[in-house]
Image (cartoon, rainbow, N blue to C red):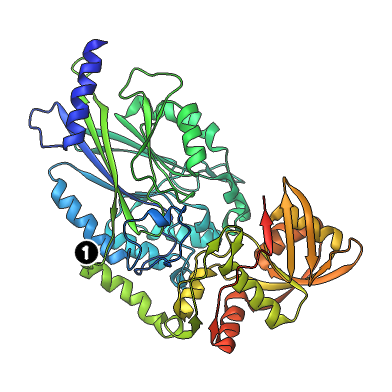
């Protein structure tokens, strides 16, 4: 035992100081470069200045003119060259599409083409890839020069895997097993509803990991489950060495280590979890150190070091990747590059007030002349920066192609929606405390249970929440994005509102 702790102490020094090449065959290093939740952000982007100081974004070392897939390609190439002779794997943990005009127009094709140019090695599917039809999802998988793995996706009728559940590959001296998992809520997305079963990821992992553990030196999960489930999985399924995670957009500046409840006689006895926030603003880097066990002659994981590397404007664009990107951007630049108006200030969140959501709701209510509008949280994807507003910026805010629906609802059901879904609102003021509605007014008057009110929402909200309540609605066919753009064009200048219309405690 003392010898083991001494070894770990020495390895800690090695990890802290860095790694150097070893010709004896006792040591081996593998580096993983990773992204997650890039959501179509192929061009550089900026965050607003007025960010919530408690947010992950506020802690970023760089917030302006960051990201961009052509810069990312250069960074990947530089790191791969610098890390030789040891190997590097480039991995994406899903949701590479659905977030910008590239996804609206090309349904993931532009994203996969650029990932091919970056020379990704492995990926899993995220829930947002299934915003496509199933045929489109499978076309993206075939198009990728990287290997896509996901173990909990099956065809409902045949129980055959949708994509390979795992792959076992030789990387230098190391036998590497990689498998993928995606969140069960993927079942509710368009492409999965057709004929795909999304199995319980914990049950799948419990069955699969021991098999992979017996065949490989290191087991890597490419996960689109979110940080909470990734930590739970690490505790409940011992044997996973590394989880390259996604879905929760978690910014882990250093890896998170979860010790297994049931120790196994291998390596560190725990799981290293990494996530690289969102949109490709930073590239994750994880260095893994292996030691050859003299008794078994197998390499065992004994050390790790991880960090997030900013993708900044001083990194030149890779010419080959830039050519691929420009081929797609050139066709849509005229449409999405035009300016529709001006933001007088940043549209950001302040406490319970969501100014960027309020802009959308107020625009819809004004343009369609209804009593109120509801928008679900997480439906408006970015905060809006002060200055010129391009159609591209609005498409990043509303990237899903949702349309506007009209509906009528009793005050009783409307109040139920406010409590259960806690939407952002226009025309309504409400307050929820301890899951109890303590205030609800519409245009200054208390909402009456038996009165019928006329409102609007987006097609996603209607399908997900109105339909199960038996509330009928009529789709206007008008895209949410276009209605908001027309509103801003008429106003010319729009200013954020922080009026306390929605309070949730």
Provide residue 50's location: percent of width, then percent of height.
45, 65
Q: Is residue 99 visible?
A: yes
Identify the residue at the far top of this view.
1
Q: Residue at x 34, y 17 (%)?
A: 265
Q: Residue at x 80, y 70 (%)?
A: 444
Q: Is residue 205 above or below residue 129?
A: above
Identify the residue at the far right of this view.
450
Provide residue 283's location: percent of width, then percent of height.
31, 53
Provide residue 236's location: percent of width, then percent of height.
50, 27
Q: Is residue 478 above or below residue 50?
A: below
Q: Residue at x 20, y 35 (%)?
A: 16
Q: Callout 1: 10 Å neighbours few (<14), some, many (20+)?
A: some
Provide residue 499's location: percent of width, then percent of height.
65, 68
Of 431 and 267, nearer the camera is: 431
Q: Residue at x 38, y 31 (%)?
A: 271
Of 431 and 475, nearer the camera is: 431
Quarter that holds the N terminus: top left
Of 78 and 53, nearer the camera is: 53
Q: Is residue 404 left or right of residue 9?
A: right
Q: Quadrant of residue 13?
A: top left
- Mark 1 — residue? 315
Q: Is residue 470 visible?
A: no
Of 413 and 476, nearer the camera is: 413
């Amino acid at each position: 035992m003392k010898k083991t702790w001494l070894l770990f102490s020495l390895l800690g020094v090695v990890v802290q100081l860095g790694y150097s090449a070893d010709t004896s065959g006792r040591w081996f290093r593998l580096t993983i470069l990773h992204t997650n939740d890039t959501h179509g952000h192929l061009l550089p982007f900026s965050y607003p200045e007025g960010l919530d100081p408690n947010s992950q974004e506020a802690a970023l070392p760089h917030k302006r003119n960051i990201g961009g897939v052509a810069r990312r390609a250069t960074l990947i190439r530089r790191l791969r060259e610098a890390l030789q002779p040891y190997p590097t794997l480039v991995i994406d943990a899903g949701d590479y599409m659905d977030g910008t005009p590239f996804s609206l127009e090309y349904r993931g094709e532009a994203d996969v083409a650029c990932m091919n140019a970056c020379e990704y090695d492995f990926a899993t599917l995220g829930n947002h890839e299934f915003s496509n039809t199933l045929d489109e999802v499978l076309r993206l998988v075939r198009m990728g020069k990287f290997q896509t793995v996901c173990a909990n996706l099956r065809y409902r009728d045949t129980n055959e895997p949708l994509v390979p559940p795992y792959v076992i590959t030789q990387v230098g001296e190391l036998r590497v097993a990689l498998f993928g998992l995606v969140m069960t809520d993927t079942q509710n997305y368009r492409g999965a509803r057709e004929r795909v079963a999304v199995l319980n990821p914990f049950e799948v992992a419990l069955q699969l990991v021991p098999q992979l553990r017996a065949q490989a030196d290191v087991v890597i999960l490419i996960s689109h489950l979110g940080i909470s489930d990734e930590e739970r999985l690490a505790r409940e399924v011992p044997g996973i060495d590394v989880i390259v995670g996604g879905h929760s957009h978690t910014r882990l500046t250093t890896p998170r280590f979860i010790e297994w409840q049931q120790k196994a006689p291998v390596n560190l006895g725990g799981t290293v979890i990494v996530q690289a926030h969102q949109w490709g603003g930073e590239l994750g880097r994880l260095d893994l150190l292996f030691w050859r066990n003299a008794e078994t002659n197998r390499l065992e994981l004994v050390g790790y070091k991880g960090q997030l590397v900013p993708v900044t404007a001083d990194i030149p664009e890779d010419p080959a990747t830039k050519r691929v990107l420009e081929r797609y951007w050139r066709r849509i630049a005229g449409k999405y590059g035009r300016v529709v108006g001006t933001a007088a200030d940043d549209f950001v969140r302040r406490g319970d007030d969501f100014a960027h959501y309020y802009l959308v709701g107020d625009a819809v209510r004004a343009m369609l002349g209804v009593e109120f509008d509801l928008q679900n949280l997480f439906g408006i994807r970015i905060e809006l920066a002060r200055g010129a507003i391009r159609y591209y910026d609005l498409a990043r805010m509303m990237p899903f192609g949702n349309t506007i629906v009209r509906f009528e609802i009793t005050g009783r059901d409307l109040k139920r929606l406010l409590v259960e879904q806690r939407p952002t609102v226009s025309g309504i003021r409400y307050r929820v405390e301890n899951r109890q509605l303590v205030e609800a007014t519409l245009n200054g008057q208390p909402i009456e249970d038996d009165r019928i009110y006329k409102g609007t929402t987006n097609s996603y909200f209607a399908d997900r929440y109105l339909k199960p309540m038996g509330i009928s609605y009529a789709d206007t066919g008008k895209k949410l994005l276009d209605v908001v753009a027309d509103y801003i064009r008429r106003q010319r200048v729009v200013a954020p509102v922080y009026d306390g219309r929605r309070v949730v405690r």
